[in-house]
Image (cartoon, coloured by chain):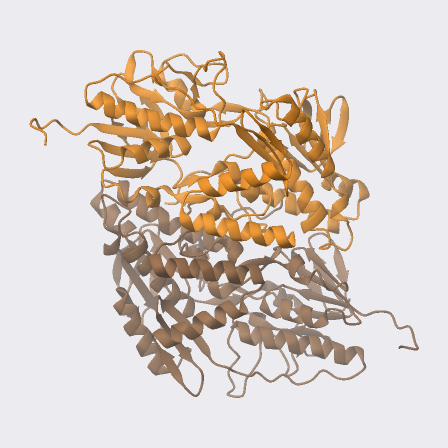
Chain colours: A orange, B brown
Amino acid sequence: METESRPVPRVVIIGAGFGGLEAAKHLGNKPVFLTVLDRTNHHLFQPLLYQVATAALSPADIAAPVRGILTKYENIEVLLAEVQAVDVEARLVRTTEREMPYDYLIVATGSRHSYFGHPEWEKLAPGLKSLEDAVEIRRRILLAFEFAEKTQDPEARAAAMNFVIIGGGPTGVEMAGAIAEIARKTLAKDFRHIDPSTARVILVEGDKRVLSGFPEDLSVSALEQLQELGVEVITGTHAENLTENGLEVAGKFIPCRVKIWAAGNTASFVGKTLGVPVDKAGRVVVQDDLTIPGHPEVQVIGDLANFTSKDGKPLPGVSPVAIQQGRHAARNILHMVEGAKPQRFYYWDKGSMATIGRNRAVADLNIVHFSGFPAWLAWLFIHVLYLVGFRNRIAVLLQWAWAYVTFNKGARLITRNFQAEQRPVG
Amino acid sequence: METESRPVPRVVIIGAGFGGLEAAKHLGNKPVFLTVLDRTNHHLFQPLLYQVATAALSPADIAAPVRGILTKYENIEVLLAEVQAVDVEARLVRTTEREMPYDYLIVATGSRHSYFGHPEWEKLAPGLKSLEDAVEIRRRILLAFEFAEKTQDPEARAAAMNFVIIGGGPTGVEMAGAIAEIARKTLAKDFRHIDPSTARVILVEGDKRVLSGFPEDLSVSALEQLQELGVEVITGTHAENLTENGLEVAGKFIPCRVKIWAAGNTASFVGKTLGVPVDKAGRVVVQDDLTIPGHPEVQVIGDLANFTSKDGKPLPGVSPVAIQQGRHAARNILHMVEGAKPQRFYYWDKGSMATIGRNRAVADLNIVHFSGFPAWLAWLFIHVLYLVGFRNRIAVLLQWAWAYVTFNKGARLITRNFQAEQRPVG
């Protein structure tokens, strides 16, 4: 029972990704009034986005409406809004439609692809961040086979059957493995004039090894597992001179129709409007309690934050970091509301994993390293466990079980979906 | 065992809807070489399209790749192609990319919406024929609630909460019922500044009664069931003067943001290129064996055909007609290949049904009329039974079961999806 009647503090969270959503849940039914802003209406389970891009799952299987997830917390409102800037002095978030005042702010707007000074490559080699990206990549992959089936030009046919993935991190490795499986298994008997199993899948990585964020033995294992699937892996060199007809790798031109970008990230522009230092990837350099210098009421989390870990390097842009930071940021706010100081954040690194295909994966659990089938099982278990919403978990499990038994992928739809426009109707 | 070696006849089917696909299956592993042309890569289970438009199902739940369905027939090839015209004299189908010669042709390109001389209304009030249409309508419905939640203009808010469906046939009735259910149940607790259950759903029908193709007692029942769901039904008048802000009905302006067109069809343009008479809806007037005058090698089926039934009226544009005609057309071709004549087509009318919502439907089985729960159960049974592909049936059943128990609709995604462009990626 409180004796004074303080005004209820207004909290704003920008972004309903892993970090923002976790923070929101921890502020649910607490003595604050919370507004969650996002420019889409859904939370996206990004680790499975490559499965939408490769026709194994539907968009709705890995996305849940933010409103639905937070509906039970009466102190939370959700607004579909495009944020333009944060005015930290005036304590205002500016959106395209109105200004939202706040007492406490969590910025969790994540990152987009970085094309290393070649923004014109984005159309040629789309990346994989949103549902729209995934549907567009799925469309390009399926259309390439359709084109190869009907063209009478052998060179154009060969180019349509080459798939190049640029970037050998977890997303690139997953995409390469999944495209190889579609070509060799799912589509194997669907065509009359081409043999999809002769498709070339080429993974290009600038570093000396794929999965360079993982321990070296797992990189070696991932390389072997990719090669078993027939993926050609080229390391230690960068893709250059991208055109509609192909790209150059190590001085050699590879004709190819479908190019997929998985090479680099750049932080959301919202970080730069905070008026504090950002690193060269555009991430906001946060203090050890996740706040920004001079503004304890503003915290930055997830892919947008550069948080220096024990070894002096920034924490990686993965969902466990975002989730733990989201929870911590929410607790910091509750502390501050009570008049206490924000606390130091510690990351508990439980390890990381990447899947390569059916029965194939690598898992780094710090003490032990797995690869192959046990790693794949662990990956499966964790991902189903963390999928938001009971319905999605069941639907995804069923579709995976079905695909596992039959090699069939159910979501092989080519639909028109364009990213050019972003304005809502009306 | 054949003694002469006749060349294998080339058959072309244009369109992989219910009619075209049924014909293709009946020509599978028969002594013909068959090419199926379609401009999309998937067969669409159109009777459930309104469920995608109202967020109950995902696109992949009601669509299956044509290639996958026909993969087991080695004499069938599938081509993704846009047909421009048929040259019946030269026996050629012209597509945007090449010409396909044929010995026998089945034209099954269906229909699009008709805006009765107002093509500019299409953008304001989209119809429901393709997956793209459904995703666009879903987006508009969900965005209207999002807009109402955040606007501070009471008039704009009221307009966003009005949903007008133009046309009271089965699609219009299904859409009206489904939108009413979303507003009253699914979204009821998701917003803070609006009460979705106060949304007005208005169904406008030019005829004197809804479901005018059904017996009169079922129209009465459908009207009652719609009213129980809170749908306002206006009959005997046409929608006029559509603008972004609303439309006029019976001289009164109804402000509304979301308008959905379910009022009329016009046959595909391909029929007009055959050089034989078409009716005023653009349908090809076929002979009693489904062939066109002077060209027994060309048959027209489904929504594109005007086939005069016993009572002197054309058969309705529903899937049972298309399926029976597809089967018949395939048999006619096999007859003709053997030197026999095409046979007369008889339609076996098993009845028709329309669903209105949870536990609500009407069914006309000729001898008996059902409405309410028994009709709804019958509808459910038939639709799951006919859904193409085992995986889809299971997935749809599970999602329905889940939605039935929880009133939750899983596919509430707003994704950007634009119909402006149709060209595949270069």
Q: Residue at x 50, y 49 (%)?
A: A396
Q: Quadrant of residue B374?
A: bottom left
In-image side of B90 versus A15 (left or right):
right
Image spot of residue B1 (x, y percent)? 89, 77
Location of the N terminus of chain A by quadrant is top left
Image spot of residue A311 (x, y percent)? 50, 12
Q: Residue at x 28, y 65 (%)?
A: B229
Q: Is residue B346 above or below residue A424?
A: below
Q: Quadrant of residue B9?
A: bottom right
Of A164 and B107, the residue lying toward us:
A164
Q: Residue at x 38, y 15 (%)?
A: A286
Of A393 and A128, the residue lying toward us:
A393
Q: Residue furthest front?
A: A367
Q: Is residue A404 above or below residue A246?
A: below
Of B37 and B287, the residue lying toward us:
B37
In-image side of B126 versus A123 (left or right):
left
Q: Quadrant of residue B43?
A: bottom right
Asked whether the viewer can see residue B211, the reply is: no
Q: Residue furthest right?
A: B3
Image spot of residue A415 (x, y percent)? 56, 49
Location of the C terminus of chain A by quadrant is top left
Of A87 and A228, the residue lying toward us:
A228
Image spot of residue B260 (x, y percent)? 39, 58
In-image side of B142 versus A170 (left or right):
left
In-image side of A142 versus B366 (left or right):
right
Q: Is residue B223 above or below residue A93?
A: below
Asked whether the viewer can see residue A318, the reply is: yes
Q: How many marks?
A: 0
Q: Is residue A345 above or below residue A39?
A: above
